[in-house]
Image (cartoon, rainbow, N blue to C red):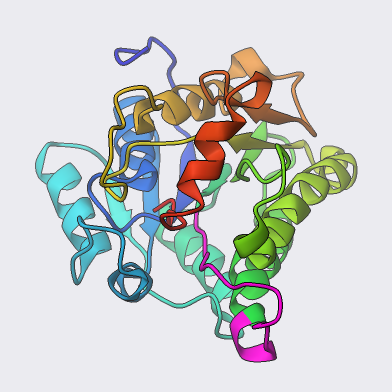
């Protein structure tokens, strides 16, 4: 579906976690804009630059992605870069995107925070970012989105989880706990937000070749795979799909856990 016929003309979409040209976020922005949506992108390059395993990270990464896409004729604008660990940023991002696009019909919450921390090394300081970025920001953004949405339109939110439910990832429990919470947030919020004509789903994109892993990635998914699914979920074709967690992981969930175990020995992708 790299040349998808799905159209999102007239849709106004906020996409987070956009800061690296090789990442899922940048691909989502490109594909949604190619489908006719007006897209506002948000990212935080400061995280990418400190993680240490994202070889495509650059300063002003979000702005660079937006310029590249806008120069190619796509309707993509940037939201002021900010850190979701800081209070007030989640709601501010939704507000700014809504103001710049004249309202929002959809969000793709692709942002992520993850570092390897073994049990026995946990502190409030290293636990809090996992929950403030991965789950608190999503909850507050859902609320802010619902407060500004036009309930006469079909609206959709897609969040991103990970493969933590396959088996134990012992060195990444804080990350796993936060990403597992996304699945439950999706299911719970879909019931409440359905009353406002908002569908809520989440994607597990599986192992993705976004430039962070130094080994062989020929058998992995690529960002376009996740974008194909996200486009579908925001289209009229998915009008009856809500509250679902969908794995687009090339079969890892049904027999490829050894691959996932090997990833945890390298690093956690920022998913941006």
Magenta part mainly helix, strand or loop? loop
Image: magenta residue range: 111-126
- Tell me where residue 268 appears, x and y as whole percent: 47, 57
Point 13% across, 47% down: residue = 68
Residue 264, placed above or below residue 259: below
Residue 176, placed above or below residue 238: below
- Tell me where residue 261 appears, x and y as whole percent: 56, 43
Q: Is residue 170 visible?
A: yes
Quarter location, residue 127: bottom right
Taking depth in this image into account, of 245 and 260 the one nearest to the observer is 260
Residue 39, placed above or below residue 148: above
- Tell me where residue 90 appears, x and y as whole percent: 58, 71
Taking depth in this image into account, of 164 and 74 the one nearest to the observer is 164
Point 31% across, 61% down: residue = 53
Quarter location, residue 160: top right
Where's the N terminus, which quadrant? top left
Q: Is residue 36 visible?
A: no
Q: Check if residue 120 falls in the magenta segment.
A: yes
Residue 187, placed above or below residue 146: above
Point 36% across, 54% down: residue = 18
- 61 lies left or right of 94: left
- 251 lies left or right of 78: right
Taking depth in this image into account, of 138 and 240 the one nearest to the observer is 138
Point 63% across, 20% down: residue = 255
Q: Check if residue 60 falls in the magenta segment.
A: no
Task: Please give the count of numbered marks on the rendered protein.
Answer: 0
- Tell me where residue 106 appears, x and y as whole percent: 57, 42
């Amino acid at each position: 579906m790299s040349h998808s016929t799905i159209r999102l003309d007239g849709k106004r979409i906020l996409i987070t976690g956009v800061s690296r040209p090789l990442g899922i976020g940048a691909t989502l922005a490109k594909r949604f804009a190619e489908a006719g949506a007006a897209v506002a992108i948000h990212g935080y390059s400061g995280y990418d630059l400190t993680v240490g395993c994202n070889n495509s990270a650059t300063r002003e990464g979000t702005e660079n992605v937006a310029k590249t896409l806008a120069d190619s004729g796509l309707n993509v604008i940037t939201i002021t870069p900010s850190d979701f660990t800081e209070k007030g940023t989640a709601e501010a991002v939704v507000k700014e995107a809504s103001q710049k696009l004249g309202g929002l019909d959809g969000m793709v919450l692709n942002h992520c925070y993850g570092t390897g921390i073994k049990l026995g090394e946990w502190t409030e300081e290293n636990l809090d970012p996992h929950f403030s970025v991965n789950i608190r920001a999503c909850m507050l953004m859902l609320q802010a989105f619902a407060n500004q949405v036009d309930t006469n339109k079909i609206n959709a939110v897609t969040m991103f989880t990970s493969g933590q439910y396959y088996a134990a990832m012992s060195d990444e429990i804080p990350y796993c706990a936060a990403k597992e919470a996304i699945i439950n947030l999706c299911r719970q919020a879909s019931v409440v937000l359905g009353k406002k004509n908002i569908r809520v789903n989440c994607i597990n994109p599986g192992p993705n070749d976004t430039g962070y892993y130094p080994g062989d990635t020929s058998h992995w998914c690529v960002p376009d795979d996740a974008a194909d699914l996200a486009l579908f979920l925001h289209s009229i074709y998915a009008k009856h799909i809500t509250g679902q967690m969908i794995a687009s992981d090339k079969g890892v969930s049904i027999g490829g856990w050894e691959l996932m175990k090997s990833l945890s020995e390298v690093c956690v992708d920022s998913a941006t």
